[in-house]
Image (cartoon, rainbow, N blue to C red):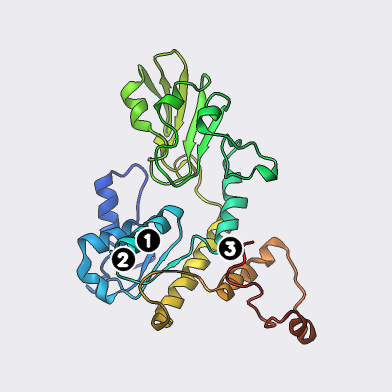
Amino acid sequence: MSDRLPYKVVFAWKGETDEEYLWCIEQTLYFKDGQPLNMILDDGGDLTNLVHTKYPQLLKGIRGISEETTTGVHNLYKMKANGTLKVPAINVNDSVTKLLGHRLLLSKEFVLDLSSLNPTGESGYEVTTMEEACKEGNIFVTTTGCTDIVQGRHFEQMKDDAIVCNIGHFDVEVDAKWLNDNAVEAVNVKPQVDRYTLRNGRHIILLAEGRLVNLGCAMGHPSFVMSNSFTNQVLAQIELWTHSDKYAVGVHFLPKKLDEAVAAAHLDKLSVKLTKLSDKQAKYLGLPRDGPFKPDHYRY
């Protein structure tokens, strides 16, 4: 809630039910004066889905959507493919400053060990299947944005007191329902930490009920990481609002120049100093002095 506004704004609270979560989202649809939302800034796709399915009459007044999660972006591409997306959208999730910030800084804040990583064997990580990893790991962190990653057959093969948690989306990556249905005992050690006894006598420690562990068991995302994400979101919103004629219904990327502007805004915090290109250097490279410095197809 905000105490600085003349009225209360409720966003969310820990322990809310699914019904309460939906109620919170619906409170964002209309302003105090009764005017409906004219932009969607989303984190996971729930607001986007709600407006498209339950409040389609609002779509005509919405200029664009910006989405910053893997799951939400997947949802946008699925909607575009099946013809249900009705508003231009910018995929903020794959902005370089957002993507690298989350990969390099976010996970390390609260993850001690990973049993399964993105397939980067060339970087020296062991890459294997969950069928193999479940027998070896002590701590399992799902990060895929997909469903059915850790299933019952994996739990049954894990070491005693293996710790399982998720930083993907919702609770679909870890089959917490299987544990609740099949464990012979479940003990709530403390809030957001449950210890299950399996029929084979071994134990599984599940964090945050399979939901986002960094939100349930920690203090959320580091402020620097979120500054990168939110700066991307704000610039995407401004871009869609001021240049709506440039964006047809579909899923677009944030222009490279704006992505670089996000990076530039955060360099001081990292104690990074860059030399500005001279006119001669810019001409030699065939680049504008002020960027963008990389083509749209470049992957950092």
Q: Amino acid at mark 2?
A: Leu
Residue at image location 46% in from the left, 19% down from the top: 203
The residue singled out by tag 3 in the image is 96
Q: Say if mark 1 contacts mark 2, CB within 8 Å.
A: yes
Q: Residues within 10 Å of mark 2 (few under 14, many from 20)?
A: many
Looking at the rendered structure, which numbered label has been put on residue 197?
none
Distance CA(mark 3)–CA(mark 2): 25 Å
Q: Judging from the image, what secondary structure is the residue with disc 2 in? A: loop
Residue at image location 50% in from the left, 48% down from the top: 220
Give the mark, 1 or 2, whose residue is nearer the N terminus.
Answer: 1
Q: Judging from the image, what secondary structure is the residue with disc 1 in? A: helix
The image quarter in which residue 283 lies: bottom right
Q: Amino acid at mark 1?
A: Leu
Q: Say if mark 3 contacts mark 2, CB within 8 Å.
A: no
Q: Quadrant of the N terminus?
A: bottom left
Looking at the rendered structure, which numbered label has been put on residue 76?
1
Q: Does residue 121 appear in this view?
A: yes
The image quarter in which residue 3 lies: bottom left
> With respect to residue 41, does 104 lie above or below?
above
The residue singled out by tag 2 in the image is 85
Q: Judging from the image, what secondary structure is the residue with disc 3 in? A: helix
Distance CA(mark 1)–CA(mark 3): 19 Å
Left or right: 139 as drawn, with respect to 244: right
Q: Does residue 2 appear in this view?
A: no
> With respect to residue 192, does 18 lie above or below?
below
Q: Position of residue 192 (x, y in %)?
A: 42, 34
Q: Residues within 10 Å of mark 3 (few under 14, many from 20)?
A: many
Left or right: 101 as drawn, with respect to 24: right
Q: Quadrant of the C terminus?
A: bottom right
Q: Position of residue 257 (x, y in %)?
A: 58, 75
